[in-house]
Amino acid sequence: MIDVNKRLYKVATPVTQYAFRANLFMWPQRTLFFGPLQHLALHSMGAVAINIGLYQPFLLKPEHGDYQSYRCATIPAGCKHELNAFGGIVASLIIEKDAPEYSYFAHCASGRILGVTNKIEAKWVQCLQKIYEDKLDKVAINTLLNQLFNTPKATACKVDARIIEVMQTIQHDPSNDFSQEYLAASVGLSASRFRHLFSEHFDIPYRRYRMWRRVVAAMDALHKVDNLTYAAMDAGFTDSAHFNRCFRNTLGVNPSLVFRNMDRFEV
């Protein structure tokens, strides 16, 4: 019988630990990143994320708190935090609010960074190690993640249909500077009611969500054009400097450090 603890805490070989380049896989409702990380500056994402240290724990610190060690942690949308992995390989799976598996993260409504139980942690670490080490194709990766979430049985989060309509409008055209008044009127809401409902259902303000979707759209565009400036402007940023600033505020690192030495980038 395999010793689970030895499996989870096995030592990474020089090939896996140091010769590794970042991988990024994108789907409409989820994004998966693998990479050796040092320090990510204070940032907050527009969707919930689960971070997994593949071979060793990492440190997370909320904006008004102290560093704590985690092997697997969930981070709510809008939660400002820093990360330090000391060069260790971290997997980060980001889940959009309209994804069926979002209900898996219902506990994130607390707004705090949370660790997971040892039993669940073991499943996550083993699954992400397999994806990384076996260099699975994107279809196989998606299948494994669905099995991990048990997605067919997942219950989609109940979001007001009017807010879902607004969210889809933003997703389909993230470069458009839709005003809150326009979007509110399009679904029969006052601007104040729209702001309240949006923050209630998405845990972040409308403008923050729009910026998040632009960052995601820029990453998607970068896969097609392989030019940061063109990708940024295609997604609605005024220039590459604007995109760099928003990317750092959202993900804690300059985009050039992520994309300049990418091994796999699949959309």
Image: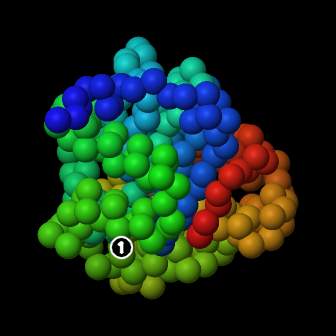
Quick check: can you spot residue 119?
Answer: yes
Find the residue positioned furthest to the top.
66
Q: Quadrant of the C terminus?
A: bottom right
* Residue in view at x 44 percent, y 29 percent: 55
Q: Position of residue 240 (x, y in %)?
A: 82, 54
> Which element is circle 1 on?
helix
**x, y (%) of residue 63?**
46, 25
Q: Residue 72 versus residue 60: which sits nearer the camera? A: 72
Residue 147 figure quarter = bottom left
Question: Would residue 187 be found to the left or right of residue 14 on screen?
Answer: left
Q: Position of residue 148 (x, y in %)?
A: 26, 56
Q: Mark 1 Cα within 10 Å, few/some/many (few <14, many 20+)?
A: many
The residue at which mark 1 appears reads as 163
The residue lying at 25 percent from left, 51 percent from top is: 105
Nearer to us in this view, 20 or 33: 20
Given residues 32 and 206, the one toward you in this image is 32
Is residue 27 left or right of 240 when viewed as pictured? left
Residue type at mark 1 is: Ile
Dividing the picture into quadrants, the one containing residue 179 is bottom right
